Image (cartoon, rainbow, N blue to C red):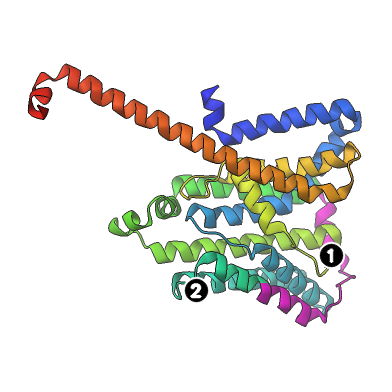
């Protein structure tokens, strides 16, 4: 049981299974493979945004502009495609804009020393404003079918973008586990001053984290446009808060240094499953935000209690070891006396 509490990803996965079972008893249609695949497909955008946000949270930062970056990248992609730009070039352009937006955040935070919450709140407004300027405040209602094809393309019975997201999650997890420089994210979040003393490039690491947050928001924007086939001005609204909630729920520590892409994955799927469950049990849609907020508060509180309990256990273990050493080494007791 202690292993479950220490592994937040496993705990949330078990809660997800429990949610599916309970809602399925109320409405058996929730158990259908088609419904479960729809939940997974609907969670892809949140998964990607959450992974990008995870990089920032690992460094003990926060980025509330990722939803706006998603919206801006979606607008750039839609405008480029409607202007006759080839799909590969339009995708690269959207990704370039998202990376540039992330780099703007990184410059302000790492070089100008603007607090992350202030910097990203400011750029959130800037990026939303750019969306309105580029489109004149109108939705992009028609998107060429070339990109929509990929949203409906199946490989071995599974949608193409699900495979893409799965590959990204696995690659990112391996990168953070095996690549030494990727571990700098954890070191900076755990103890920034200590990381400096170990000659870890703190500024470069922070710059990379915010740039990656922008990149992942851009990838999410491509899937967003492909799935819905148009770009509303509300694109990406609220995704930043849901991404933070998914990360914390999955086990990413808001105080930095703890978390994996798997944390973001299970947290995002769980939140999406909750939204779908409310539909299947016929709860009005305007309850979604309230439920999401309640889950975020519960996740933060649970995170605090679990971390505190683990820290207390570690202190007790260290005290027990010291007591045993003093008992076995009489000379130590004499010196202390």
Residue, disc 2: 107
**Up-down: is 79 above or below 223?**
below
Q: CA distance from mark 2 to mark 1?
A: 36 Å
Residue 157 appearing in the image: no
**Which mark is on residue 146?**
1
Give the image location of residue 209, x and y in percent: 51, 60
Instruction: Please give the range of residues in magenta.
Output: 125-153
**Picture quadrant where residue 335 is located:** top left
- What kind of element bears circle 2? helix
As drawn, which residue projects farthest toward the top? 328
Comparing 308 with 66, the one in front is 308
Comparing 80 with 306, the one in front is 306
> The N terminus lies in which quarter of the figure?
top right
Q: Which residue: 88% across, 28% down? A: 26
Decide if residue 134 is on the left or right side of residue 284.
left
Residue 142 belongs to the span the image colors magenta? yes
- Number of residues whose C-alpha sits closer than 10 Å to that of mark 1, classed few (under 14), some (14–19) or many (20 or more): few
Residue 206 belongs to the span the image colors magenta? no
- Number of residues whose C-alpha sits closer than 10 Å to that of mark 2, classed few (under 14), some (14–19) or many (20 or more): some
Q: Mark 2 or mark 1, which is nearer to you? A: 2
Comparing 138 with 253, the one in front is 253
Does label 2 or label 1 sit earlier along the sequence?
2
Give the image location of residue 146, x and y in percent: 84, 65
> The C terminus lies in which quarter of the figure?
top left
**Up-down: is 224 above or below 247?**
below
Give the image location of residue 57, x and y in percent: 53, 54
Residue 99 appearing in the image: yes
Decide if residue 210 is on the left or right side of residue 293.
left
By secondary structure, the bulk of the magenta-drawn segment is best described as helix
**Picture quadrant where residue 203 is located:** bottom left
């Amino acid at each position: 049981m202690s292993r479950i509490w220490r592994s937040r990803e496993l705990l949330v996965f078990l809660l997800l299974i429990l949610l599916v079972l309970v809602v399925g008893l109320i409405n058996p249609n929730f158990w259908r493979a088609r419904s479960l695949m729809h939940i997974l497909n609907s969670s892809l955008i949140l998964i990607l945004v959450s992974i990008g946000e995870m990089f920032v949270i690992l460094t003990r930062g926060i980025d509330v502009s990722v939803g706006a970056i998603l919206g801006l990248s979606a607008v750039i992609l839609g405008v480029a495609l409607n202007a006759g730009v080839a799909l590969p070039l339009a995708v690269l352009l959207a990704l370039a804009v998202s990376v540039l937006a992330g780099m703007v955040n990184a410059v302000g935070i790492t070089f100008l020393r603007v607090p992350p919450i202030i910097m990203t709140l400011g750029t959130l407004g800037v990026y939303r404003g750019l969306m309105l300027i580029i489109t004149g405040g109108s939705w992009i209602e028609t998107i060429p079918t070339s990109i929509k094809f990929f949203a409906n393309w199946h490989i071995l019975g599974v949608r193409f973008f699900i495979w893409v997201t799965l590959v990204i999650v696995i690659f990112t997890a391996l990168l953070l586990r095996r690549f030494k420089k990727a571990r700098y994210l954890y070191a900076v979040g755990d103890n920034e001053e200590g990381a400096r003393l170990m000659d870890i490039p703190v500024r470069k690491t922070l710059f990379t984290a915010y740039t990656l947050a922008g990149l992942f928001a851009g990838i999410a924007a491509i899937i967003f446009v492909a799935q819905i086939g148009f770009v509303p001005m509300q694109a990406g609204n609220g995704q930043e808060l849901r991404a933070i909630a998914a990360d914390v729920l999955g086990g990413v520590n808001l105080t930095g240094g703890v978390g994996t892409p798997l944390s973001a994955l299970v947290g995002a799927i769980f939140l999406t499953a909750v939204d779908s469950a409310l539909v299947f049990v016929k709860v009005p849609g305007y309850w979604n935000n309230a439920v999401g907020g309640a889950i975020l508060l519960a996740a933060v509180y649970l995170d605090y209690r679990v971390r505190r309990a683990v820290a207390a256990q570690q202190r007790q273990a260290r005290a027990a070891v010291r007591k045993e050493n003093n008992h076995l080494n009489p000379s130590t007791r004499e010196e202390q006396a």
